[in-house]
Amino acid sequence: MFAAKLTTLSVAAALAGAMSLAAIATPDAVAQVALKSGQVKCYGISAAGKNDCANQAGTHSCAGQSKVAFDGGEWKASASKDACVQAKGKTEPFKGANPDIKS
């Protein structure tokens, strides 16, 4: 009887821990870690495989996993909004590839 209760408690604790980690490690939370103070997300400027972190669609949560060059849902960190605009990017995600950058 004691072993069954211990096993049940162990399983419950493991599930609670896994759910807590899942809540913390959302793409937005991971994405915020990649930005340094003052930086902004600049969408549509990363070459395929050169993004900095999670994409807007949530299909991946890591750097270097973009499949399409200059995708409007992929971002790289930029020093400022002005630097992003100068690189022909946007500070808000958009659909499709960036029409202002020729690959």
Image (spheres, helix red, strand yellow):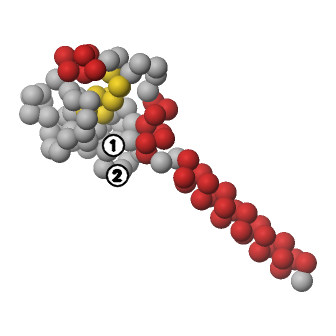
Q: Nearer the viewer, residue 74 or 29?
A: 29
Which x, y percent locates residue 73? 26, 41
Q: Quadrant of residue 3?
A: bottom right
Going by the numbered disc 1, the residue's amino acid type is Asn
Q: Disc 2 and disc 1: Cα gap in Å?
A: 7 Å
Q: Residue at x 48, y 48 (%)?
A: 26
Q: Would you call the spot at circle 2 few (<14 residues within 10 Å), some (14-19), or many (20 or more)?
A: few
Q: Residue at x 35, y 17 (%)?
A: 79
- Regarding residue 50, the answer to whether it shows in the image is no
Callout 1: SS: loop
Q: Residue at x 16, y 23 (%)?
A: 88
Judged left or right of residue 86, residue 76 is right
Q: Residue furthest bottom?
A: 1
Q: Quadrant of the C terminus?
A: top left
Going by the numbered disc 2, the residue's amino acid type is Thr
- Which residue lies under the disc numbered 2? 59
Q: Residue furthest right?
A: 2
Up-down relation of residue 81 to residue 28 (above or below): above
Q: Would you call the spot at circle 1 few (<14 residues within 10 Å), some (14-19), or many (20 or more)?
A: many
Callouts 2 and 1 close, C-beta under 8 Å: yes
Which x, y percent locates residue 102? 9, 28
- Regarding residue 59, the answer to whether it shows in the image is yes
Callout 2: SS: loop
- Which residue lies under the disc numbered 1? 55
Q: Which mark is residue 101?
A: none
Q: Residue at x 33, y 29 (%)?
A: 41
Q: Quadrant of residue 8?
A: bottom right
Which x, y percent locates residue 12? 71, 68
Judged left or right of residue 58, residue 20 is right
Up-down relation of residue 56 to residue 48 (above or below): below
